[in-house]
Image: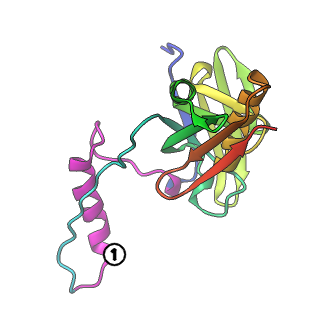
Amino acid sequence: LDDGRQVIHRSPADAVTLLPFERIDTDRLAPHIGEVLLPLTPDNVTAIRLRLWPEIIEGAYYHYSHGLKHHDGNCQRIAHGHRSRIEIYRNGERDLLLEGAWAARWHDIYIGSREDLVEASSGKHHYHYTASQGEYDLVLPAERCYLIDTDSTVENLAAHIADLLGKQNPDDDIRVDAYEGVGKGAVGIST
């Protein structure tokens, strides 16, 4: 029985890692990564111990997944995700309300390119593309998707938000600092 929340994902086998537990947290994930890596090390390595922790983000952040078909590496995988902070400046001052609104809008969302949307019906979105690592398909409930006109790079996401906010606030100077994980981000400025 399909209740409208079904997710269908097709990709090359090496684009997905199945985990042997239902809930993902650092206590389960760290030893599992060590067990997977140990057979790949030289014989004189007898153990791997990892410590994982989430990035500390003070303030608003968005949590999304996407795929970048033009990327040369693993970012082309159709449903990889990010937990990223966002800073929005209106006339040189941070606007915490706008930051919170965008964080809520992009909480657990799939950001897809219109170019990759092959079907939008029955409350679902079907995305498809071919990249250098293979063919990718993703079907999701439409309410969990956000469409943009470009690829969903962090540069384009910052520009997208700045453009929309600039249109909504034509008398204000808008600057968006969008991040993608640790140490990577982009700036979008309304025109």
The answer to which quarter of the image holds residue 90 is top right
Boundaries of the magenta span: 14-43
- Residues packed near mark 1 inside 10 Å, few (<14), some (14 to 19) or many (20 plus): few
Q: Position of residue 142 (x, y in %)?
A: 62, 21
Q: Quadrant of residue 39?
A: bottom left
Image side of residue 149 versus residue 52, left or right: right
Please state the horizontal and vertical placement of residue 74, each as a whole percent of the image. 57, 58
Looking at this view, is 62 or 89 the one in front? 89
Q: Is residue 12 above or below residue 160?
A: below
Question: Looking at the image, which residue is at 70% across and 40% down?
Answer: 128
In magenta segment, residue 5: no
Magenta stretch encompasses residue 34: yes
- At 22% from the left and 70% from the top, the residue drawn is 48
**Residue that label 1 marks:** 40
**Can you give x and y, in whole percent of width and height, for residue 92 in the image?**
63, 39
Nearest the camera: 172 or 22?
172
User: Which amino acid, by three-letter code, is at mark 1?
Assistant: Leu
In front of the other: 184 or 145 = 184
Left or right position of 172 against 60: right
| Residue at image point 74% right, 26% down | 119
Return the residue found at the far left. 46
Q: Residue at x 53, y 37 (%)?
A: 64
State which quarter of the image contains the C terminus. Answer: top right
- Front residue of 126/49: it is 49
**How many marks are shown on the rendered structure?**
1
> Relative to 86, is 161 on the left or the right?
right
